[in-house]
Image (tube, grey):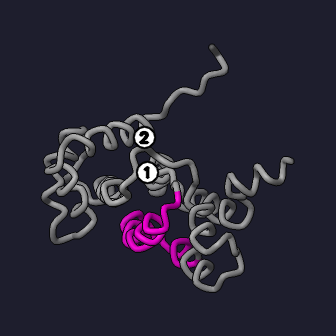
Amino acid sequence: MSGERKESTEEKLISDIYIRLKQDTAFRAALKKADNPDTEYQSWEYLAGYGIDIEHESVRLPYTTIFSAVARSGRESDGSLELGVALVSAYQNDQSSPPARARLRRILACSTVQEACAVLRPMLRLIGGKGIPISYARLLHDLNFFSKDPGQTKARWAQQFFGGLPEKAAAEGNK
């Protein structure tokens, strides 16, 4: 059983969020509002219940941003695509698309996690609206790591955008 990959903390958390969203409509409503600065306080009781430090914005914002996107997604489980691949997928896998490149440049210009979360909100709505199966667990991990090493996180997103192939394209390339 050494070949099995251990589920990360973020994967467990996102999985729990999906399960709870199916059962608790108040939870879903509060999380949908979590990424709006004027209404995010309505989600604090739920975030605190998961042990998230709600006092510090730089710790809280990655969770409110991701939880809100999960609640709005309408999906029943987490996706598998990383942010860069999901973004290029939103533009018909066209890495040269000016709007796709503009969104990528904007996220790569962020220097704080607060700024990154603000830029991600509309990007996640676009990706979610197109039904692209982004991995919210992986993105949450990236945002939690962003404060420690923003350069590495942004380089990973750029690599995913320019070098990562969507699963479908990768599978077709292996034939």
Task: State the quadrant of the N terminus.
Answer: top right
Residue 67 percent coordinates (x, y): 32, 53
Residue at the extreme top of the image, as rendered: 1
Residue 109 percent coordinates (x, y): 53, 76
Disc sitting over residue 140 in the figure: 1
Element on which disc 1 rests: helix
Instruction: Provide the residue span drawn in magenta.
Output: 105-132
Disc sitting over residue 10 in the figure: 2
Q: Could you say which quadrant of the image residue 122 lies in?
A: bottom left
Is residue 9 positioned above or below 66 on the image?
above
Q: Any magenta on residue 110?
A: yes
Identify the residue shown where x is 72% and y is 67%. Answer: 162
Residue 167 percent coordinates (x, y): 68, 52
Q: Which amino acid does label 1 sit on?
A: Leu
Residue 154 percent coordinates (x, y): 58, 63
Identify the residue shown where x is 38% and y is 42%. Answer: 14
Is residue 33 positioned above or below 21 on the image?
below
Residue at the extreme right of the image, as rendered: 175
